[in-house]
Amino acid sequence: MNIVISNTSNLAIYEQIVAQIKDAIINKEILADEPLPSIRSLARDLQISVITTSRAYDVLVSEGLVYSQPGKGYYVSKAQTNMLKEKRLQLIEANMMELINQCKNAEITKDDMIAMINLLYDN
Amino acid sequence: MLDTEKISLEVRNLSKKWSDFTLDNINISLPEGYIMGLIGKNGSGKTTLINCILDGVKKNRGRILINGVDHRRVAAKNDIGFVLEEGPFFMDKTLAENAYLFSRFYSNWSDAAFSNYLSIFELKDFMRYANLSKGMKAKFQLAFALSHKPKLLIMDEPTGGMDPVFRRDFLNILQDLVCELNTAVLFSTHITGDLDKVADFVTMLDEGKQVFTMTKEELMDNYPIIRGRKEDIHLIKEGRPMRVRKTTNGFETILENYNILARNSSLSERFTKSRPSLEELMYFFSEPLF
């Protein structure tokens, strides 16, 4: 797992960490029951504060993606990976709906759309 | 916050009166393993506060506890490492002689650690303290302080004389220390960019008063910089703007009560908000000079 923080991003630093750990979980870079880096070592690696890092982990815990074992550290939850995929699917569906509406407004037919997707998808 | 936390530095109702300056009722609580930055203009009281904690000047009122022990006790002093403008070291002696003389006050002193830090910091033990540059003095003091494994590290403007390359390493060293030894760190600086990166808590002083002590997260969340057009300035009065910087066709400020704006979406649409840097916060939180 590789976390990269950008100072110019619109997202707060803790939100960037949350998003990137989510990606790593979805992409199976870290598997269920595998440990996340400790709060302090991640803070040190990213040169950010401990509280910022623990806030990111708190968010992940509250969303059920990560669980903490007191005294030991943070681990990826089992069941929640599918949930995360489901959520992502919902987001993609919503984006697609938006796209379809845009196409309808621009009088682009379904066939034209599919043709466009075929062309662009493999690029 | 992390598991169970021991308070490493506790300052309660601290006051110190000089003839022309008063440090007024300061309260700080710093858990072990965290970094607190101390910011404020020149003469805001940062150095006085640090000297009071180190018992270099006698406080008039209040209590200061180091890991629960009164800061004037030997046991407390044994746990504190410090880096000051000059430090207590003898000007005409070499670094090795100084280390030998002062290390005897510390029960956890390690000669091996000291020579290791000297070589990391590119200092030689035969150098004379008086001949060191400002940055090198800070490095030597840091090497000395780290060699007795302090539980609390207190530094007054340590990065002022350091080059940007070493400053980056310096921050790494601090984070290693926090990570491995669970040391608490309090340091004052004008180079707030250092704190933007690593500080957990920030305390700001202004004219001897404690303006705030907050986690950096709280500061970033609750005090965004608000920018808007000149004619809209009256709309934010309710949010209590602190200090307003006017430009030719607009203004920027920080609100004491940003929630009022955040809760009203039609109102907040008229303004842009951006995450503040500590430098900007310091500007907007301090009393204007003119």
Image (cartoon, grey):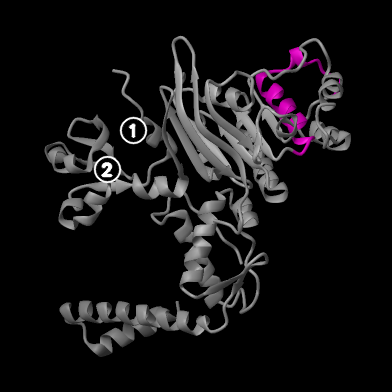
A9 sits left or right of B243 in the view = right
Q: Give, as a three-letter code, the residue at label 1.
A: Phe
User: Does the segment drawn in magenta span residue B76?
Assistant: no
From this view, report whether residue A73 is shown above or below residue A117.
above
**Where does the image place residue B192, in percent across and percent down from the top left?**
49, 34
A72 sits left or right of B30 in the view = right
Q: Which residue is mark 1?
A: B284
Farthest residue to the bottom: give it. Answer: A111
Magenta region, main secondary structure? helix
Q: Quadrant of the N terminus of chain B?
A: bottom right
B166 sits left or right of B246 in the view = right
Q: Chain of mark 2?
A: B
Is residue B160 shown to the viewer in this render?
no
Q: Give, as a three-letter code, the residue at label 2.
A: Ile
Frontmost residue, A104 versus B45: B45
Give me the C-alpha separation between circle 2 and circle 1.
Answer: 11 Å
Local packing at callout 1 (Cα closer than 10 Å; few below 14, some 14-19, many 20+) is many
* Residue at the image position 19 percent from the left and 53 percent from the top: B269
Q: Quadrant of the C terminus of chain B?
A: top left
Farthest residue to the left: give it. Answer: B231
* Residue at the image position 83 percent from the left and 27 percent from the top: B103
Q: Secondary structure at mark 1?
A: helix
Q: Chain of mark 1?
A: B
**Where does the image place residue B98, in percent across and percent down from the top left?**
82, 20
Q: Which residue is mark 2?
A: B226
Residues shaded magenta? B125-149
User: Does the segment drawn in magenta span residue B128?
Assistant: yes
